[in-house]
Image (cartoon, rainbow, N blue to C red):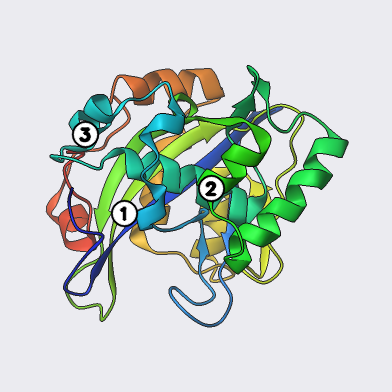
């Protein structure tokens, strides 16, 4: 497996949650707190890949070999999918998992019960494997589509080798940004998010802006996901994008 950290570079995963509203797609974005990595920036939910994220026996829809091929590694690629699912749950309360073939969260009662698990995951009192054992969960990795690959430029003191994923918001769940992990969260149209950045009201970096530009032309989640499945969403990898950290998808 590739190491979780090499020098000052740490493996990470990010999730672009999407939903359809009249007139087009919205994405869920959060604002980082004014401390830690990427202070005050508006970003998509995500974070570091952990050693405990290697759970091939609990993953549905993506196996080890196909995950490794998708991201272009010799082993451990499935960790990115699990990290994306875990971070999505921790940062916005949305869980891509099933129990006995049904969505693990399918209404207010289960959402409330799982909010306690969410707090325990964030506090380090529980890991994803233990949560899956308690609730009989399978991780719905096939609902996370690999989207893009970014590496923080060399000038940064702390760098992240990040795989971006895109997913459609599950039915009967609510996205709610965590009160300590983030400052706030909201659903927003990509064009409006870019307008706020251009007006100086939001701060965003190149990976976020490029992702918004890739999503903005699509009016429906199904069309977007079909395009991503075919890898037809990727822009030309220009010198500018390379300088900003965009990598070949594998």
Distance Cα–Cα, label 2 vs label 3: 21 Å
Res. 168 image quadrant: top right
According to the image, label 3 marks what residue?
68
- Earlier residue among tags 2 and 3: 3
The residue that appears at 44% across and 73% down in the rendered structure is 38
Q: Residues within 10 Å of mark 1 (few under 14, many from 20)?
A: many
Residue 162 tag number: 1
Res. 18 image quadrant: top right
What is the quadrant of the C terminus in the image? top left
Judged by depth in the image, the label closer to the viewer, 3 or 1, is 3
Q: Nearer the viewer, residue 137 or 90?
A: 137
Judged by depth in the image, the label closer to the viewer, 2 or 3, is 2
- Earlier residue among tags 1 and 2: 2
The local secondary structure at tag 2 comes to: helix
According to the image, label 2 marks what residue?
128
Residue 231 tag number: none
Q: Is residue 65 above or below residue 213?
A: above
Q: Nearer the viewer, residue 52 or 175?
A: 52
Q: Is residue 67 above or below residue 115?
A: above
Judged by depth in the image, the label closer to the viewer, 1 or 2, is 2
Residue 111, position as x, y percentages in the image: 79, 41
Q: Nearer the viewer, residue 231 or 122?
A: 122
Residue 226 seen in the figure = yes
Residue 158, position as x, y percentages in the image: 29, 76
The residue that appears at 59% across and 57% down in the rendered structure is 126
Residue 146, position as x, y percentages in the image: 35, 34
């Amino acid at each position: 497996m590739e190491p979780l950290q090499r020098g000052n570079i740490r493996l990470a995963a990010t999730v672009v949650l999407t939903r359809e509203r009249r007139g087009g797609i919205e994405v869920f974005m959060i604002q980082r707190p004014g401390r830690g990595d990427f202070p005050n920036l508006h970003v998509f939910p995500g974070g570091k890949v952990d050693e405990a994220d290697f759970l091939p026996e609990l993953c549905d829809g993506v196996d080890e070999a196909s995950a490794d091929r998708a991201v272009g590694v010799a082993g451990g690629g499935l960790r990115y999918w699990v990290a994306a699912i875990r971070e999505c749950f921790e940062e916005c309360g949305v869980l891509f998992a099933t129990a006995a073939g049904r969505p693990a969260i399918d209404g207010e009662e289960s959402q409330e019960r799982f909010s306690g698990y969410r707090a325990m995951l964030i506090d380090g009192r529980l890991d994803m494997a233990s949560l899956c054992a308690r609730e009989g969960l399978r991780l719905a990795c096939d609902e996370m589509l690999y989207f893009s690959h970014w590496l923080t430029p060399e000038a940064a003191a702390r760098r992240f080798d990040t795989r971006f994923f895109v997913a459609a918001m599950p039915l009967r769940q609510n996205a709610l940004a965590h009160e300590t992990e983030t400052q706030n969260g909201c659903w927003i149209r990509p064009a409006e998010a870019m307008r706020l950045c251009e007006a100086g009201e939001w701060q965003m970096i190149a990976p976020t802006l490029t992702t918004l530009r890739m999503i903005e032309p699509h009016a429906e989640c199904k069309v977007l996901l079909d395009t991503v499945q075919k890898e037809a969403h990727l822009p030309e990898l220009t010198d500018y994008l390379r300088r900003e950290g965009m990598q070949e998808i594998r």
